Image (cartoon, rainbow, N blue to C red):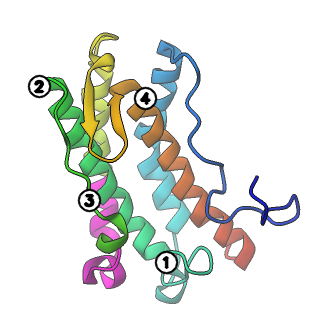
């Protein structure tokens, strides 16, 4: 907990905490994380169900992205992850290209486009990703890629991080709805 966070004031930026992978990742962890990826598109749809334009354009925290930007960010981020998985499975420790997610979130489509296309994209992307992940062997989950800024990571660590990412952004939306009484 940082010095500004108290038990009374939840951390709006990291409502479920930061990603903390288990010391030893097991097949059960991988199965749970794949399950999370499989079910997040429906949870995202439920989280934004019946929100109007003004609500979608409400930031989840002061200085944070709007719900609309979060919805558009999820397929942007997960498309990059899906490609990273495919690169790691077909190349020896490829160097992946990072992207500036904060700048992507400021592009016109992320700030103003209807969310329907991103919800559909997220759903289709996760169906493909889950199909790929479900077919991987334990050895394939040990394949790695190199991120120029954060180093080498294997696919099982990365799977856990993206399962966490799903819960992280769902919590942004769900907790804003609760705080605003939008249930």
Q: Nearer the viewer, residue 27 or 45?
A: 27
The mark that comes first in sequence, 2 or 1, is 1
Residue indicated by mark 2:
90
Can you tell which mark lies on residue 97?
none
Q: Regarding mark 1 in the picture, which secondary structure is present there?
A: loop
The single residue placed furthest to the left in the displayed view is 91
Residue 137 position by quadrant: top left
What type of secondary structure mainly makes up the magenta span? helix
The mark that comes first in sequence, 4 or 2, is 2
Q: CA distance from mark 2 to mark 1?
A: 36 Å
In the image, which residues are magenta? 105-122
Q: Regarding mark 2 in the picture, which secondary structure is present there?
A: helix
> Dot 4, crowdedness within 10 Å: few (<14), some or many (≥20)?
some
Q: CA distance from mark 4 to mark 1?
A: 28 Å
Looking at the image, residue 29 lies above or below residue 115: above
Q: CA distance from mark 3 to mark 1?
A: 20 Å
Residue at 33% x, 27% y is 155
Q: Nearer the viewer, residue 12 or 131?
A: 12
Residue at 37% x, 64% y is 73
The mark that comes first in sequence, 3 or 4, is 3
Q: Regarding mark 4 in the picture, which secondary structure is present there?
A: helix
Q: Is residue 60 left or right of residue 52?
A: right
Q: Regarding mark 3 in the picture, which secondary structure is present there?
A: loop
Q: Nearer the viewer, mark 4 or mark 1?
A: 4
Please state the horizontal and vertical placement of residue 104, each as a whole percent of the image.
29, 71
Residue indicated by mark 4:
157
Q: CA distance from mark 3 to mark 4?
A: 19 Å
The single residue placed furthest to the bottom in the displayed view is 54
Residue indicated by mark 3:
99
Looking at the image, residue 131 lies above or below residue 81: above
Residue indicated by mark 1:
66
């Amino acid at each position: 907990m940082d010095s500004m966070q108290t038990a009374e004031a939840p951390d709006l930026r990291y409502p479920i905490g930061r990603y903390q992978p288990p010391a030893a990742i097991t097949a059960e962890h991988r199965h749970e994380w794949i399950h999370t990826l499989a079910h997040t598109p429906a949870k995202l749809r439920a989280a934004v169900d019946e929100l109007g334009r003004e609500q979608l354009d409400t930031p989840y925290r002061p200085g944070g992205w709007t719900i609309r930007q979060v919805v558009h960010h999820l397929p942007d981020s997960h498309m990059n992850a899906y490609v990273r998985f495919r690169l790691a499975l077909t190349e020896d420790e490829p160097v992946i290209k990072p992207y500036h997610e904060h700048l992507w979130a400021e592009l016109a489509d992320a700030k103003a486009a209807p969310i329907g296309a991103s919800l559909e994209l997220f759903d289709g992307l996760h169906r493909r990703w889950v199909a790929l992940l479900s077919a991987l062997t334990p050895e394939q989950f040990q394949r790695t890629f190199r991120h120029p800024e954060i180093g080498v990571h294997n696919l099982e660590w990365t799977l856990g991080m993206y399962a966490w990412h799903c819960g992280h952004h769902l919590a942004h939306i769900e907790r804003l709805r609760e705080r605003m009484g939008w249930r």
